[in-house]
Amino acid sequence: MKKFAILVASTAIIASMSASSIQAADGKKTEAAAAIVGVVALGLLGAAVADSQHNSGNVEYRHHPHLHPDENAVGACMHHTKHLVKKEGGHKAKLDKVDKVEAKSHGETLVVFRATGYFDFGHKTSKIRCTVKHHKVVKFEFT
């Protein structure tokens, strides 16, 4: 819980610093920069919850009531990633970048992100497309 509180505080600081630089930009740049800051925050919070739940031994991701559905979607995808890395003999998975979080039809959310799995032999970075429905991963593809 302490890690989560620290991460939330650091996310707020990053967002406020980025917001001040966004205000200085023109209209189109402002919208693009705000979207980037939003996606970064989604990734940070969702990954923090996934870390906490994974480290607590939760086999499945549990919806966090204080997070936005998009943050929970990122969390569910990262939780799934961590389990796959562990199943393949890895010892750590880290979220590198969230490229897109998009609500689809029928209550599904598509999350496209990059993550790195760390193994005894080295590491592997993958681009992942993950679809979440009702807080559960229903489709997971990586390259």
Image (cartoon, rainbow, N blue to C red):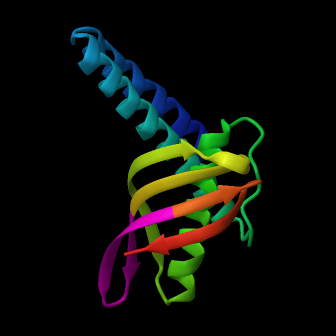
Residue 110 position within the rendered picture, expressed as x and y whole percent measured from the top left: 55, 53
When the figure is inspected, residue 141 is found, relative to residue 87, above or below; the finding is above
When the figure is inspected, residue 16 is found, relative to residue 59, above or below; the finding is above
Report the residue at 61% width, 69% height from top.
Answer: 139
The residue positioned farthest toward the left in the image shown: 25
Marks counted in the figure total: 0
- What's drawn in magenta, residue-wise? 115-129
Residue 141 position within the rendered picture, expressed as x and y whole percent measured from the top left: 49, 73
Residue 121 position within the rendered picture, expressed as x and y whole percent measured from the top left: 31, 90
The part of the image, by quadrant, that contains residue 20 is top left
Residue 125 position within the rendered picture, expressed as x and y whole percent measured from the top left: 32, 71
Name the residue nearer the viewer: 93 or 131.
Answer: 131
Magenta stretch, overall SS: strand
Name the residue nearer the viewer: 2 or 129.
Answer: 129
Report the residue at 39% width, 29% height from top.
Answer: 35
The part of the image, by quadrant, that contains residue 57 is bottom right
When the figure is inspected, residue 49 is found, relative to residue 42, above or below; the finding is below
Name the residue nearer the viewer: 53 or 136.
Answer: 136
Report the residue at 77% width, 56% height from top.
Answer: 62
